Image (cartoon, helix red, strand yellow):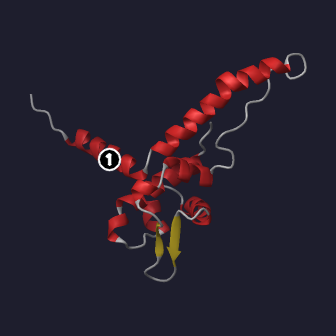
Amino acid sequence: MKISAKGRYGLAAMTYLARRYQAGTPITIISISEKLGISKIYLEQVFSLLKRAGLVSSIKGSQGGYRLTRAPHDISAYDVLSSIELALMEKTAPAAPEKAPELDRAMNATVYDPLDTAIRDTLASVTLDQILTALDQENQADSFMYFI
């Protein structure tokens, strides 16, 4: 599995939208770009893919922007990454296709295919809500002040 910068930025931007989901107001790419420090042009490409996948909707005009089409607990990391990444699960190249094809089939059956399934299942089990909960925990841990 390989997650590109575009995939990581998309997941971060979707988490940012998830944080503001309850407000129901669209968020501009410029505000996401400024808050997360991600190129506006890069985010436009990402949001084009997210919109095509039906994960976000766009509203045009001066009060426009993007918002999630579903609640954060209904959008998984797999939903986001699979809409952005061209090949989230790349097929493993054969090790010995001509001399020992049965070895390649055995490795696929016992190693590579189960690994791909485990990664897919893990990403599908993590929702934007869970990422927000982890973010809140990180923020709380950073806010502790220690006195000596």
- The answer to whether residue 50 is left or right of residue 136 is right
Q: Position of residue 58 (x, y in %)?
A: 52, 73
Frontmost residue, 8 versus 88? 88
Residue of label 1: 133
The image shows residue 67, relative to residue 63, as above or below, that is above
Residue at the spot 54% in from the left edge and 58% down from the top edge: 39
Frontmost residue, 44 versus 127? 127
Query: What secondary structure is found at the residue carrying circle 1?
Result: helix
Q: Residue furthest right?
A: 98
Q: Position of residue 117 (x, y in %)?
A: 60, 35
Label 1 CA crowd tier, 10 Å (few <14, some 14–19, many 20+): few
Residue at the spot 79% in from the left edge and 17% down from the top edge: 103
Q: Position of residue 63 (x, y in %)?
A: 43, 80
Q: Can residue 114 be seen in this view?
A: yes
The image shows residue 145, relative to residue 101, as above or below, that is below
Residue 62 occupies which quadrant of the picture? bottom left
Q: Is residue 96 visible?
A: no
Residue at the spot 41% in from the left edge and 57% down from the top edge: 72
Residue at the spot 61% in from the left edge and 53% down from the top edge: 84
- Assign the C terminus to one quadrant of the image: top left
**The residue under label 1 is which amino acid type?**
Thr
Total marks placed:
1
Q: Where is residue 50 in the image (x, y as percent from the top left)?
A: 57, 61
- Assign the N terminus to one quadrant of the image: top right
Frontmost residue, 101 versus 95? 101
Q: Which residue lies furthest to the bottom in this view?
A: 61
